[in-house]
Amino acid sequence: MTTTDTGNTANSTDSTDRTGRTGTSGAGRPRGAVAAFAVRSGGTRQLAGTGALLRFALRRDRWTTPLWTGVIALMVLSLPNTLKSVYGTAAERADLARQMLTNSSLRATYGPVFGDSLGGLTAWRGGGYAGLFAGIMSLLIVVRHTREEEESGRQELLSSAMVGRRAPLTAALLAALAANGALVVLVAGGLAGQGAPGALALGLGIGGVGMVFATAAAVVAQFTQSARSAKGLTGAALGAAFVLRAAGDSAADDGSSPLTWMSPLGWLENERPFARERWWVLLLFAVAVVLQGALAHALAGRRDIGMSFLPTRPGPAAGRLGTAWALAWRLQRGALAGWGLGFLAAGAAFGGITQGASDLVGDNARTREIIERMGGRSGITDAFLATMTGMLGMVAALYIVSAVLRLHGEEISQRAEPVLANAVGRLRWAAGHLVIAFGGAVLIMLLGGAGLGLGYGHEAWPVLGACLLQVPAVWTLGALAVLLYGVSPRVAPGAWGVAGLVLLLGWIGPALDVPPTLMDLSPYGHLPKLPGGEMTWTPVLVLTVLAVGLTAAGLTALRRRDLSA
């Protein structure tokens, strides 16, 4: 697995200079001076071509990265006006802060409140989740431009040119740095009116979380031989960071728990934007980024392209996967298990804070109005449960899109061609993945509903039914992904944009009082608000038929087009 970088360093045994003379190089330079110079300049040669690779990465991400940064920034920047409309006076905001500090379940979900200004409440309500999404964005960027490039074979082709051994990793980290830098500028600039120091601290904290998990993904990518494993392991680390932060904040109301300090998300909250900022906490982000980045670069120079320090176990001598469905299950079972466990844990967390929903609302008519707009007008507890089931449904759209687009990944990596070269038709091949994608959406919503019911402790069956009611809307977005992929692999990633916009509408639309015409663009806006609301079957049936139609159209288009070369 250890290799010598013969393509990018000079031959240490060759002392012939450009004039053809041997023994000396230049005016009296002794033998071996060229070799010594080559060794000294090896660091620069290791990064040769970084600029070109960075421009290539930014061009490939010219749509996805601006979408990620725009959605995350808008999620944060929309909060001050929302909070001002809900808690218009300083007394109301101070009362909210006191209530949050006394409710451990709400602290576990959002963290403690350190300041009752609009800026402080914005950092409390959106800072942690913005950091979480920044971490997801960053790990996807790094894995895409490192392990995915090696897995597809493109990196081997690029490395045959004047490209240093560590240049691809450096370019990937610089692309993640550019994305997080843009996020810092957007957040700091957008919140400057609430206080420039606090806005800058919050922006740097969110970007710092993103870079911590960017460099973590860079390290993980050296140990795993597949992009899927790299994403899964880094995502698991991000989930563990959220759990540590939640556990620590539920135990202490001032962020002082050791568990909180073990999480980069805990560092973000302990930076205390808009509440006498602790600038020294930024050193924790800097140290983590430097150490992890240095480790990733050290490891990258000591392995062959396409290999890893923990290689994939060889398969059995006789294959056990006899059907396209079995192959799809083998490829997707890990992701499905991770999503299922995540939904079970998230449902339990949401169920645990349901009892405190009335404390969160209090006598605030505006808050009640927003929750009822999201969850119906059947009582604050039922409306809150309906809101949580709706949020689980919108997040499930991300699962089904990723599962459907696994077809896209198999095609562009040319792993689909050997399968289709056998007695396997395109529809059978695609159907194996789609059964898991659409069936998996049902499974994770069941687990989310089970966790929500267990966490709440009441109305388990109505809550479970409300979660399953979200499935037709989830299927509709998954079917749209099938259609986009069937039409052309080039437009398939656009399904992420649609899912992101739907999630954004559901997240901030009710708080901003977005016009009903725009809200109706989301399939979730047509579903009945359960539990507590009136059940109507018409939108459920319409969305189901629409999902079937879009899926059929996508499969028809897939049959008629050529596969990617």
Image (cartoon, rainbow, N blue to C red):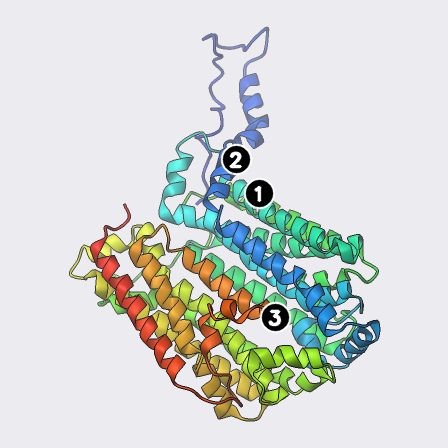
Q: Position of residue 16 (x, y in %)?
A: 47, 13
Quadrant in the picture for the C terminus: top left
Q: Secondary structure at mark 3?
A: loop
Q: Could you tell me which residue is drawn at 53 percent across and 46 percent down?
A: 299
Horizontal arrangement in the rendering, residue 408 relative to residue 163 (left or right): left
Amino acid residing under circle 3: Asp
Quadrant in the picture for the N terminus: top left
Q: Secondary structure at mark 2?
A: helix
The number of numbered discs placed on residues in the rendered structure image is 3
Horizontal arrangement in the rendering, residue 467 relative to residue 114 (left or right): left
For marks 1 and 3 on the same chain, the one whose residue lies earlier in the sequence? 1
Marks 2 & 1, CB-CB < 8 Å contact:
yes
> Separation of disc 2 and disc 1 at Cα?
9 Å
Front residue of 22/433: it is 433
Mark carried by residue 14 = none
Amino acid residing under circle 2: Thr
Mark carried by residue 513 = 3
Q: Secondary structure at mark 1?
A: helix
Question: Mark 2 = which residue?
Answer: 50
Amino acid residing under circle 1: Leu
